[in-house]
Image: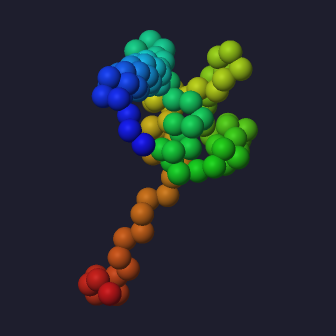
Amino acid sequence: MFIDKEEFEKWMRRILERLDILENKITKKKKTRYTVNGELLYDNQDICVMMNVSKRTLQRFRSSGRLPYRRIDQKTFYLESDVKNFIRDHLKPSKEKPEDETGNDI
């Protein structure tokens, strides 16, 4: 099958134009970061990824009152300072190496 050079170049220009359009859409679609009084707000997805927990676990943290949250237009947000305090107060520290009676590492 033979394709005319001009026809090929025309098709390539069309493909490149469409790729440029897609690139512009992707760069415009970057996540909007909201703030309240200069403090970052995180949404459920941010917190789930940050703490490696499920949405259900996050809901339990909210329901128990351990993690304060704000509702804005049917969406749940968490203040950065509240998240930091929650992590500091509620998440378990990593276990250190066990020691024997003499204080030496086992």
**Image quarter hosting the N terminus:** top left
Residue 102 is left or right of residue 85, and the answer is left
The image shows residue 67, relative to residue 76, as above or below, that is below
Comparing 7 with 90, the one in front is 7
Residue 40 is left or right of residue 47, and the answer is left
Q: Quadrant of residue 61?
A: top right
Please state the total of marks drawn on the protein image.
0
Q: Quadrant of residue 97?
A: bottom left
- Please indicate, yes or no, whether residue 30 appears anywhere in the rendered image: no
- For the point 56% across and 44% down, which residue is it? 48
Residue at the farthest top position: 37
**Where is residue 96 drawn, in percent x and y?**
37, 71
Comparing 70 with 22, the one in front is 22
**Where is residue 103 drawn, in percent x and y?**
28, 82
- For the point 34% across and 82% down, which residue is it? 99
- For the point 41% across and 21% down, which residue is it? 14
- For the point 66% across and 44% down, which residue is it? 55
